[in-house]
Amino acid sequence: MSEYLILRHRAIPGLERLPVYLEHQGFAAFKKAVMELPPAQVIQMVKDSGLRGRGGAGFPTGLKWSFLPNDLWPHYVVANADESEPGTFKDREIMESNPFQFLEGLMIAAYAVQANVAYIYIRGEYWHIARWLDQKIAELEQAGLLGERLFGTDYSLRIYTHLGAGAYICGEETALLESLEGKLGQPRLRPPFPATAGLYNRPTVVNNVETLANVPLIVLNGPAWYHNYGTDKSPGTKVFSLSGCVNRPGNYELPFGVTFRELIFEHGGGVPEGRTLKAVMTAGASSVLIPMDESVLDTPMDYESLNKFGGSLGSASVIVLDDSVNMAWLTQKTVNFFKHESCGKCTPCREGTYWMNRLAERIVRGKAGLREVELLYQVARQMQGKCLCALGEFSTLAVVSSIDRFRADFEAVVTKEPIYG
Amino acid sequence: MGKMVTLTIDGQVISVPQGMLIVDAAKKAGIDIPVFCYHPKMEPVGMCRMCLVEVGRPVIDRTTGQPILEADGTPKIQFGPKLETACTTPVSEGMVVRTQTQVVAEARRGIIEFLLTSHPLDCPICDKGGECPLQNLTMAYGPGESRFQYEDKMHLAKHVPLGELIYLDRERCILCGRCVRFQSNVADDPVIAFSQRGRALQIVTFSEPGFDSYFSGNTTDICPVGALTTADFRFGARPWEMIPTASICPHCPVGCNLTLNVRREAAAGGREVIKRVMPRQNEWVNEIWICDKGRFGYHYTESPERLRQPLVRKNGRLEPATWEEALAFAAEGLRERSGVVALAGGRLSNEDFFNLYQVVTARQGRAVLYSTMAGGDYVQRYGLSGDANLAGLGKGDAVLVVATDLHEEAPLWWLRVKQAAERGATLIVANARPTKLERYAAHVIRYAYSEVLEKVQSLLAGESPEAQALAKATNLVIFFGQEGLSLEASEALATMLARLLVQNGQAERPLSGLVAVWPHANTQGGWEIGFRPDPDLAHTLATAGAVWVAAADPAGDDPILAQALEKAGFVIVQDLFLTETARRADVVFPVQAFTEREGTWTSGERRVQRFYPAVPELENTRPDFMIVAQVADHLGIPLVGRSASRVFDELARALPAFAGLSYTRLAEVVEQWPLVGRGDLYYGGTVYENTQGLGVRLARMSAGAELSEWPAVEIAPAPADDALYLVPVVRLYDQGQTLVPSHLLQQRMARAALYLAPATAAQLGVQTGERVEVSAGEWAETLTVYVDANVPVKAGLVPRSTGVPLRQPLWVRAQRAVLEPQP
Ligand SMILES: Cc1cc2nc3c(=O)[nH]c(=O)nc-3n(C[C@H](O)[C@H](O)[C@H](O)COP(=O)(O)O)c2cc1C
Ligand code: SF4
Ligand code: SF4
Ligand code: SF4
Ligand code: FES
């Protein structure tokens, strides 16, 4: 990678320290926005940049900001730092090593929607990062970059961190808001969307950490500049979290449109011990299994191209699977994860994940036959299209795609070699 | 009326108000969409996913804004890729909903199969079996057979007490959240909640005592499975064995409509007994809810202490007698004496009051209402009128609540006033101490007990924000009680409040008026018929030639009245129990309980409602009106006494407010919304639909002459600097004779105690648990102290009906009680 937009700390040592960040045009964008740009113009810039949300759904960020009604106050901005998708670990690196760029993005977002309070909702396991960010926030306040009447204007902003308590579902924006309000983390009905009825029933923007980290450079360099990176419909770069059967797992910041081949082989160093690539999951556990062949390897990775495999880019946590992995085993692992993380609010997901997990366990233990494999498939299908939030739907993706595409793996475990005796 | 929207459901074209949810629109059209988590009285949550249907919408041409048409000229309809939940999706113009397709059937089958995976299917021993939405919907839409492996079933605790009133069966719970939402959003006692997640999700309580809410029983009605049961009924009977009888709650002036479920029972010697009390829909009164006092407070009717035989005083002792003897003896006692005083309590029916009134007036006697609160005559003239329903109050209207704690005194009114405030009505709460209703109040008026009249008078002056809010309200409903007031002061209060309505121009409006928060179900009925409270009851009793007491226990309530009664010439008592008053009587008649007889009550909103006999009478008892008529008969006064209906018809002929009413009219019903009932338990719950009468509101009496100035009442000033104003306050669960037999509530019943502000307690040098002697003249009591920050300074609160003889507020001297040293 020649150029970093997000993981700039890799090129600039010490960027996590305020003086260094300031030296590299830090907070110039925020200052410019607050002092020179009307909020609507900031929103327009982000719209024009084509920035899309990095939290999973790829929703246009500027458009989301523009949905907040101006007759209902206060507005809130919430940074989604719950980062709970298995295989996703990009927000962590951003917050640890380039915290000010993220905070500046959050601050610009807050200014753009005229929020005076912003929250960072961080997964509980990242408590040390929350403490770290608290220090950074204090430094910003001391430096006069955050607080009351900034730069002599009327605009004031406070940022607070809030720790989650270890639930994947609290990364879903409405469950996150419930949790932030001190309630049980379960998704809300949508509509109304957070943009009109979010935190404490007030208009709220929820954005992923990485999404926000893009904002300062867009405001500083202009939307047109941003289009130099990535594809037409997915401009910019993306931090891919690469894991699984690769030689060099880790975060890779690459422009959208890069191919699987480039990511896995050029950057990830290929599959260990020369084994054969079998499949990838592109959105952590919430993925369909995409069987790998040459044509797939040359597919560009952006929000549109993966549709043809029935998949989506999601948070771009690419899990690589080689021929040493039995997909029945993998299915059981994902289903177990979703059983553990289902919030229990709606029937199909609560009961379905529990049921699928029981079946999958039995299958990998050799305590079941093809009938159970078929039943597992049916149960997943029976859940689809009926769940209250996306988690329930996610839980079926690996099941259905693996039984569809890797039936032989299931046949092997139920007839010949159970994975756990 | 808002905009209407036209849509098609299963080929049927219907028009419904904009904003209505598909599930309700279908219901209106007679199409049942199965639901579990949805309830028509609560906001939808879309959790159970049972109500999935196909929803199509017209395709709109972006350029013209017009619907695109098919070749045949009908609008092109586009169906979404997924089914939609009918309970969360509002109707829209041109929408097409399909509920009977293969996909929908499969979705329903799937959801039922999921719900049953870990369900114990113990219907044969489940209280809900037979009236269970899950059971019924499984029969209608379920797969018949499960593919879930039996050994994978979760096994969870089956007898989890959420407090001593309500039990939870965790296996049966389908996690629909209705109970949690009812408690948070309807009752606003968020004392139960979900805990954990996924398949470990469960209902928990975290209050002390568990499930601390006066409305808890309602959750057992709306729970769509047998997960929530009342300790009172669980394992008591199967729904299909029980016969429903329409009734009215006897416990407070709201007049909640009830259904009594009755079964013949071996354990009761083959008698028919009441197994449970259920709400009966009346959207004008209690909607579909009742409080736990109404639900659990019926056991007094089956108390072994009930009187079963007339008693006559012979040689100074009360001895059993035959009815004939007792009636003759009573008539004899009356014939010989002039100056008869009838003293009647608000538990009597209108018919009882009417007959009693007839006899005493025929004997030139006086009809005295056993009450320390006035204002019923104002309610007659300035009460609500016509079809007015508190549910109609909203933005632009106001509700004023004075000198009462509605949550304790009339829980359903509390609920309905709260809802009015939530709909946007301006709520003003005036009391000497904080009450739970204040959470919803736009204005709180706080006063010292002695200043209440001045405060209310200042509302008439029109200066304060409260006065202005009242003045500009379109409709104004005023609830007034008697907390801290003497009889005279409550008379003055009622006058002022009536004046307020007149002055603001609201008095003529149907949905405006006074509502008296009486201590009993039919106190207002007593007023309507002509009974009036007596400010000097002790004197009246002491000088009476004869006293005829019905449904009152003056001697038990107050030693001074007991003494007065001893002086009365001759005493007749009609009661359920051998009360202190009955012990002092010359003749005692055993009466029937409301469950055994019929009659009518007039609620505090002046709604006359019928109750029906549910169980056979206790042998040898008679209804009050009949006893009165039979005594009258011996005196040569002809009265109707055979049936309540005939007495009521007499009464309707005699009293202008009842003009035009008949017993049968009271039994009329109209269709109510939401449609609930036994046909589809899954929609409204096990509440009974109303087929036996919504009752009728009495006509407003003409206001008559200009409102008089109110009597110049001064609440007695403190006799000494350190005097304490002792105020009886109402607690829902008291130790009254009509509640104590409901043992289930024992732990929650108020006890005789003295509640003091921290400052007052400090002055007296006492702490919670210590004792204080309070005295005024000869009157003296020693009470255990509870320090409570909500009590006003210089006041001491004493729960009513807990054995402390305090009927009205009283200035007392207080001092720490010194314990006798232990020998
Ligand atoms: C089950 C589930 C888990 C999610 N977890 C996360 C998460 O950990 N972090 C995140 O940023 N978004 C997560 N999302 C997406 C959020 O709901 C939301 O779309 C996102 O925060 C919006 O931010 P963006 O527009 O910047 O992407 C999750 C969504 C679902 C359905
Ligand atoms: S789909 Fe799963 S996580 Fe989402 S609301 Fe339903 S139970 Fe909760
Ligand atoms: S106890 Fe009943 S009402 Fe409450 S969540 Fe369970 S099934 Fe629903
Ligand atoms: S609110 Fe009053 S009338 Fe209604 S159930 Fe309770 S005590 Fe009975
Ligand atoms: S989701 Fe509609 S009734 Fe439960």
Image (tube, rainbow, N blue to C red):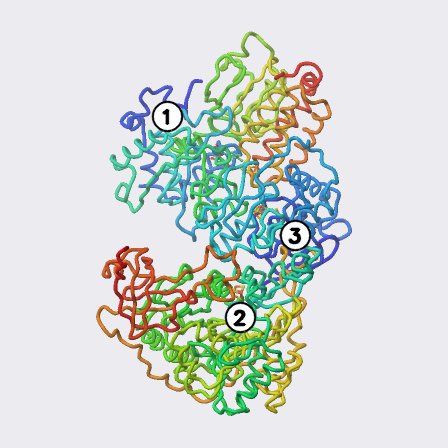
Mark 1 and mark 3 in contact (Cβ < 8 Å)? Answer: no
* Label 3 residue SS: helix
Q: Residues within 10 Å of mark 1 (few under 14, many from 20)?
A: some
Q: Is residue B710 visible from the viewing direction of this image? A: yes
* Label 1 residue SS: helix
Badge 3 residue CB within 8 Å of ligand 5: no
Residue most extreme to the top: A273
Q: Residue at x 68, y 51 (%)?
A: B33
Please state the chain letter of the residue tagged with numbered disc 3 in the rendered image.
B
Gap between marks 1 and 2, in whole Å? 78 Å
Q: Are marks 2 and 3 on the same chain?
A: yes
Please state the chain letter of the residue tagged with numbered disc 1 in the rendered image.
A
Q: How many numbered marks are there?
A: 3
Q: Callout 3, which amino acid?
A: Tyr
Q: Is A133 situated above or below B136?
A: above
Q: Residues within 10 Å of mark 2 (few under 14, many from 20)?
A: many
Q: Nearer the viewer, mark 1 or mark 2?
A: 2
Question: Image quadrant of residue A367?
Answer: top right
Which disc is residue A96 wearing?
Answer: 1
Name the image quarter holding the N terminus of chain B: bottom right
Q: Nearer the viewer, residue A292 or A419?
A: A419
Which disc is residue B577 wearing?
Answer: 2
- x, y percentage for residue B568? 44, 84
- x, y percentage for residue A60? 50, 37
Q: Nearer the viewer, residue B503 or A368?
A: A368
